[in-house]
Amino acid sequence: MGRPKRLYPLGRYRLRIRGEVDPNKQYLIELEYTWGKSAYRKGVNLFAKYIDWNPDANQGRGGVRPSYGPEAKRVNALLMSRVDKVDSNLAEYHQKHPGEITPEVINDFLNDKPVTREDKGKDFVELALERLASDYSRNRIGRSRYQNGKSGMNMFQEFLVSKNKGTYKPDSIYVGDLTVELVEDYIEWRRTIKKNSDATINHSLTPILKACAYATELRIFDAAVNARIQDMRISPKVSMTVDDGEFDGKSLTGDELTKLIEYYDSCLEPRRKEYIEMFLFAFHACGLRVVDVMTLQWNHVDLEKKELRKIMIKTGKRHIIPLSDVAVDILKEWKKKHGKAKFVFDLVKDDLDVDDEEALYRVRNSATKCINQSLAVVGEQLEFKFPLTMHVARHTFAVLALNKGLSMTVVSRLLGHGSTDITERVYARFLPETLSAELGKLKNDLGQYGYIPK
């Protein structure tokens, strides 16, 4: 049997000799790695005479003889330290990337450069802090947010050390080594060890998410991994019973809706674009609830008549909703993509029984969490004052419809409320524009009863 092929090279030293040997000349000592049929060398800034050189010293690695002088032991120790470091780096690289040792990898280790890899050997925390400093210098964030971001990254390094997650140093990790699982572990560590609230954890994720997005723009981080990490903010717990009982004022203005559409046009992440499409559909479908968006079937839709007929999950009543041209256009695009599926937006499996309350509860929670986590990232990037969720689409439709002059009765019917009392209780106190507009209709009639004080 022949000698088994090495999976990565080991280094040895040699003298850089060109031509005939000169016994009185000091030759540069260089470290050499042979891989395939090629040799890769790097001088180590140490010199020795040919007569003082022993190629078999240091267990065959090469070194100087005692005749070198009193510094012989120190020089040999330096040589062994250097070759052991490069050998260890190559061994570690092979373990992480089997079969991927290349000339570029060997040369990078020899030259003390970050190993050739997609992330260029960039440290993740360093990148996050650079991004924070850039935002702060351009007045995109204030000093408080800047300091909080730095504190958050310090906490992230503490997590790396305590959980032994560092990849090349205890408190450090390369950009390319960041994973969804690592961020999940970090969230759980903040929750269980640091006892942080969900809101605090979400704040601590901000510099991490921004660094991942920035690394993706630089093409040193996997876009698919970034997309999953961007959706990892913790969403509020979803309840099947909480819906229209109280309006918290979270609705978008016309300008904010325009910003959302502009964001959609430039978004490069397909799944996030789909979630925005669902949000816009819910808005244009007269504020359709998220659970009804999720359970919308193709047999509920008549694209020719531009209407939607469906038994609403919350009320159990059949509801007819007129569809705007935009809503119809969205449905036509989804028809091309998922027209063979049972459910329009492909959020649940075709075998879901919508009458099974327990099954519906589970899939609704899961689907809503995914959508809202993604929308929350969009809302933050657009600097909305509150987390963007699917239910914001419903509130936005109601507020804009009322402020455009639709009566409370009509809006109540479009929303599918049981009575106008619900609509009035939820929205009326937030609508001074409507009240002013209605009063304006009486301006001329009331004007004739004017009173001029004397």
Image (cartoon, rainbow, N blue to C red):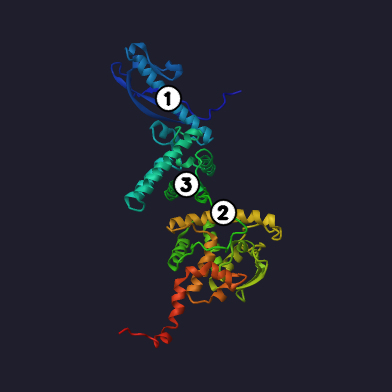
| Element type where label 1 sits in the image | helix
User: In the picture, which quadrant includes the C terminus?
Assistant: bottom left
- Does residue 122 appear in this view? no
- Give the camera-side residue of 336 and 146: 146
CA gap between label 3 and label 2 equals: 20 Å
Going by the numbered disc 2, the residue's amino acid type is Cys
Proximity of marks 1 and 2: CB atoms separated by less than 8 Å: no
- Does residue 180 appear in this view? yes
CA gap between label 1 and label 3 equals: 46 Å
Camera-nearest label, 3 or 2: 3
Q: Position of residue 344 (x, y in %)?
A: 62, 64
How many C-alpha atoms fall within 10 Å of the one at disc 2: few (<14), some, or many (≥20)? some
Q: Mark 3 highlights which residue?
A: 200
Q: Position of residue 22 (x, y in %)?
A: 30, 18
| Element type where label 2 sits in the image | helix
Considering every residue shown, the one lying at the far bottom of the view is 448
- Give the camera-side residue of 145 and 79: 145
Camera-nearest label, 1 or 3: 3
How many C-alpha atoms fall within 10 Å of the one at disc 3: few (<14), some, or many (≥20)? few
Q: Which mark is residue 83?
A: 1
| Element type where label 3 sits in the image | helix
How many C-alpha atoms fall within 10 Å of the one at disc 1: few (<14), some, or many (≥20)? many
At horizontal 49% and vertical 77% (from top left) the residue drawn is 405
Q: Is 334 positioned to the left or the right of 201 in the image?
A: right
Q: Mark 2 highlights which residue?
A: 370
Give the mark nearer the N terminus: 1 vs 2: 1
User: In the picture, which quadrant includes the N terminus?
Assistant: top right
Name above or below for residue 9 compared with residue 135: above
Going by the numbered disc 3, the residue's amino acid type is Thr
Q: Position of residue 402 (x, y in %)?
A: 50, 73
- Splitting the image into 4 quarters, where does residue 408 fall? bottom right
